[in-house]
Amino acid sequence: MTALGAGAESSAGDVDPVILMTACADLCELLDIENDALAHQDPETVAALLDRKEALTGAYVDAVRRLATGTPAVFSPDQRLALLGIARQLDTLIERNAALLHAAIEAARVALEVIASSAREAQDNDPAKVYNRAGTLSGSEDKGGRRSFNNLL
């Protein structure tokens, strides 16, 4: 369980500022790693981070909800300043994460669209040719040749 999930409440509905800041810092660290993985097109790392990201995000949302609906939290001026700083960092990382995720999804969509278009075009040009499970073309004069959307293979 995350830091927030284990003893985050100091009394009925209150959130311990130190635990909240730790959870925010953990989420920032995770988003920084995920953003780097997205920028370097590393889907394995992104997938490996998913469960922890969901847990940290859920804990963060729960804490913010308790802050909004519970007894007003008492933060020292230093804690308030630190929390505002980490909240700004988290906001920046979330915006970058959303942009990188959108770009990755769009790139995958375009690649699939190009592949599907190439397959449709090959089918339209020679209906006897079809792609089989091995990724080869069967039919016509093209015996077992492979095609790719950029014609490099």
Image: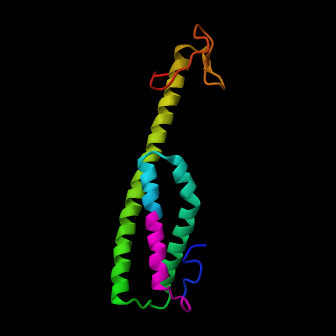
Q: Is residue 22 visible?
A: yes
Tell me if residue 32 comes above or below residue 127 in the rendering: below
Q: Nearer the viewer, residue 138 or 21?
A: 21
Q: Position of residue 146 (x, y in %)?
A: 56, 19
Q: Residue at x 61, y 20 (%)?
A: 136
> Which residue is at a point 58% across and 7% down the rendered structure image?
141
Quarter of the image with the N terminus in it: bottom right
Q: Is residue 110 magenta?
A: no
Residue 18 lies in the magenta stretch = yes
Left or right, 82 with respect to 108, comes to: left
Q: Position of residue 59 (x, y in %)?
A: 54, 73
Count of numbered badges drawn on the protein:
0
**As rendered, which of 75 and 105 lies closer to the eye?**
75
Can you say whether 48 is above or below 109 in the image? Answer: below
Work out which residue is located at the far top of the displayed protein and give it. Answer: 141
Residue pictured at 42% horizontal, 53% vertical? 36
The answer to whether residue 101 is seen in the rendering is: no
- State which quadrant residue 96 falls in: bottom left
Q: Which residue is most to the right?
A: 133
**Which percent across, then down, holds residue 125?**
52, 14
- The answer to which of 32 and 67 lies nearer the viewer is 32
The image shows residue 9 at horizontal and vertical percentages of: 55, 86
Main secondary structure of the magenta stretch: helix
In the rendered structure, which segment of residues is drawn in magenta? Answer: 10-29
116 relative to 76, above or below? above
Report the colour scheme. rainbow
- Could you say which quadrant of the image residue 135 lies in? top right
